[in-house]
Image (cartoon, helix red, strand yellow):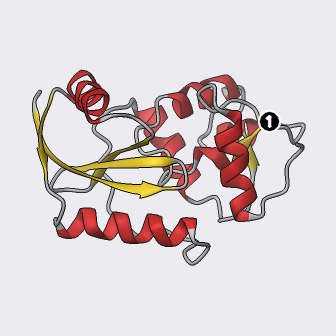
Amino acid sequence: MRHALKYTVFPTPLGPMYAAASDAGVCRITYDVTVDVFETDMLNRFGANLTFVPDDEMLSTVEDQVTRYFAGERKVFDIPLDFLRGTPFTRRVWRTQQAIPYGACRSYKWVAEKVGRPRAARAVGQANRNNDISLLVPCHRVIASDGSLGGYGGQPDIKAFLLDLEGADYIR
């Protein structure tokens, strides 16, 4: 299925951030890539027809809220999301993680228990790996049961940066 999506790009402390949305909501956020890499990623993920729209109302709201988040001025995102991929399980994981408060951490096991699959902590980690909207669906707030970071797509320094920004408590 092809999706007609719009996107914008804006600066953040992590590098250029790309945000893409359908008419229903944000479906992708990623950072520190090139336009070509982003466009190829969107085609591979969603079969997307992309249009660069720097002044779209929803995308402007995303830019404003994310910029304020990085400035320490925003703790909650109230942007509509559109999960274009994912199984019912992964979508439950993502929705559960949206409820983890700013500055708080929960374990992979905790998320697994909340979605009704207490033995599926590794599957929660896999759902996080496939999270298309990683900042707005805060998988960085999910850590190992021992308080250590756990995974973050091979970028634990980014996960630590986000948790430090929020003042979260974890084992460094």
Q: Position of residue 166 (x, y in %)?
A: 70, 63
Quadrant assignment, res 13: bottom right
Quadrant assignment, res 128: top right
Q: Position of residue 34 (x, y in %)?
A: 33, 34
Q: Amino acid at mark 1?
A: Ala
Please name the residue shown 47% across and 34% down the image.
90
Q: Is residue 166 above or below residue 35?
A: below
Tell which of 76 and 31 is nearer to you: 31
Q: Is residue 6 above or below residue 113?
A: below
Q: In the image, is 101 to the left or to the right of 83?
A: right
Please name the residue shown 46% across and 67% down the image.
67
Q: Secondary structure at mark 1?
A: loop
Of the 4 image quadrants, the one containing the C terminus is: top right
Q: In the image, is 171 to the left or to the right of 162?
A: right
Q: Position of residue 47 (x, y in %)?
A: 16, 26
Residue that numbered label 1 is attached to: 144
Confirm whether residue 111 shows in the render: no
Please name the residue shown 31% across and 70% down the image.
61
Q: Position of residue 78 (x, y in %)?
A: 41, 70
Q: In the image, is 23 to the left or to the right of 170?
A: left
Please name the residue shown 18% across and 60% down the image.
54
Q: Is residue 55 above or below residue 73?
A: above
Confirm whether residue 23 shows in the render: yes
Q: Residues within 10 Å of mark 1 (few under 14, many from 20)?
A: some
Of the 4 image quadrants, the one containing the N terminus is: top left
Single out the residue that lies furthest toward the bottom. 73
**Number of marks in the rendered image:** 1
Tell which of 149 and 32 is nearer to you: 32
Tell which of 139 and 166 is nearer to you: 166
